[in-house]
Structure formats: structure tokens, C-alpha cells
Amino acid sequence: MGDRAAKTELFEQFARVGKALGSGKRLELLDLLAQGERTVETLAKTADLGVTTTSAHLQTLKQANLVSTRREGAKVHYRLAGADVAALYALVRTVANEHLADVEAARATYLGPGTEEVTRAELVRRAETDDVVVLDVRPREEYEAGHIPGAMSVPVEELAGRLADIPSDQEIVAYCRGAYCVLAHDAVRLLTSHGRRARRLSDGMLEWRLADLPVATAPAAEGGTRQAIED
């Protein structure tokens, strides 16, 4: 028989990852970092947290080696430690959705009324024939860090004022961060209210990356861009 103390220690090491994931806000930070590298300040603003609280959550994630950092001057940039971390986060959502009835109610409350969707496979096929406008409605820095090739960047908060920039003779497929991102739903609702033919991608950039589909990048305004997930 194996040593009981050694076995206990082994499972305690496994538990470090579980403990790091045991916070809704830390999961939200992982969701954001799956889109691209971020500073503490940017993460705090997007997640509606204080900088000190955000930093504490990030330190917990770093202690479990789920995120890594790089320093640029006085700024510390965080990123996911690997594609396996993104896959783990996605799996946590899937398991929760499959086994917790409360997830569906929370999802419906957050995302609002249903909008028509397009599967990833259909979007890949239609994008190849150029008969659809692919619209990335995430913040511009997320688009720059990695987007579906050929996608047009129109952050959702700019969409109402930029309708004239979007071709009106083609169907629009909007996408955002992932299956539980509200931005694409909001974009489709706005577009259809203006008489545009619009649907949303059934998931988003997180799942697109995990499916190992092509990802394009755009030059950032300053300092270039980095991958959302370490190789």
C-alpha cells in the first residue's frame, strides 16, 4: 500500500487548482484573460472590481500557476499560463451547465431574450464564400489580440453610430468572447431593430481558439500585441 501522508499531499496539490477556481470573480478574470493579455488596472475596470481586490485574485491564480506575468516598465501584464487553463475554464462552465439547474436561470437573466445563432461550422463554411459579414463586437484591444480572420471590428458600444460602415446587403454574424458573453446578443438585437439581417455565433473567441481554428491579429496602437494564451 502507498503512503497515506504522501497520497494526502498529492491530492492537496490537486486541490490548489480547485481552490484557485473557487471564486466567480476569479473565473471572470480567466474569461477576460482568455481574450488577451491585460494589466491589473484594465482587468479591474472591466470586471468592476477595485485594483487591490483584482490584484489579490490574480495572486491567487498565479500561486496556482494558472496565470503568468510579464513586466513592461511599471506595468505588470497578466496572461493565461497555457491553453490547458482556457480548456479547464471552459470545462468548468460546461460541467456547471450540465449539473446545476440554477445555471440556466442565471444565463437567461444575464443574456436576455434569445437571439438567432449560427454554429461555428456554418460560419467557417459561409466565411469561405464571402457571403456573410463577420462582426467582432468585443473591445478593440481584444480584437487586436486575436480575432476570426476577416472579421470587422465594431465594439458594441460603437455599433449604433457605425451602422453605415457595415454592408447592408449581406447577413451579419456577430461574435464576442464566448458562449456566455452578452455583447453579441446585444449587437444582434440592435442590428435587427434597425432592419438588418443578423445572427450571432453560438459560442465565441474562447471556443474558436480551443477548436484550433485560424486566428488573426492586428497591430496594437502601442507596443504590439501578444497571444491570449501561451503556447
Image (tube, rainbow, N blue to C red):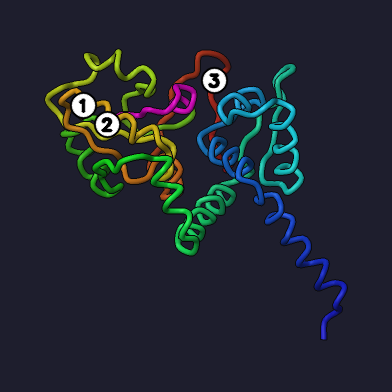
**From the image, which quarter does the N terminus lie in?**
bottom right
Indicate the secondary structure of the residue bearing disc 1. helix
Amino acid type, callout 3: Gly
Q: Nearer the viewer, residue 198 or 71?
A: 198
Indicate the secondary structure of the residue bearing disc 3. loop
Rendering quarter of residue 177: top left
Kindly check if marks 3 and 2 are in contact, taking CB atoms under 8 A apart as contact: no
Q: How busy is the neighbourhood of tag 1: few (under 14 within 10 Å), some, or many (20 plus)?
A: few
Residue 89 x, y percent position in the rendering:
55, 50
Residue name at image x 39 percent, y 46 percent: 108
Amino acid type, callout 1: Ser
Which of the numbered marks, if any, corresponds to residue 189?
Answer: 2
Kindly check if marks 1 and 2 are in contact, taking CB atoms under 8 A apart as contact: yes
Amino acid type, callout 2: Arg
* The residue stretch that appears in magenta: 134-144
Tell me, yes or no, whether the highlighted magenta stretch contains residue 139.
yes
- Residue 178 lies left or right of residue 31; in this view the side is left
Q: How busy is the neighbourhood of tag 2: few (under 14 within 10 Å), some, or many (20 plus)?
A: some
Cα separation between marks 1 and 3: 37 Å
Residue 44 x, y percent position in the rendering:
63, 27
Examine the rendered structure and indicate whether residue 60 appears above or below residue 71: below
Residue 113 x, y percent position in the rendering:
31, 41
Which of the numbered marks, if any, corresponds to residue 107?
Answer: none
Instruction: Write down the residue under mark 3.
Output: 224
Instruction: Write down the residue under mark 1.
Output: 193
Cα separation between marks 3 and 2: 33 Å
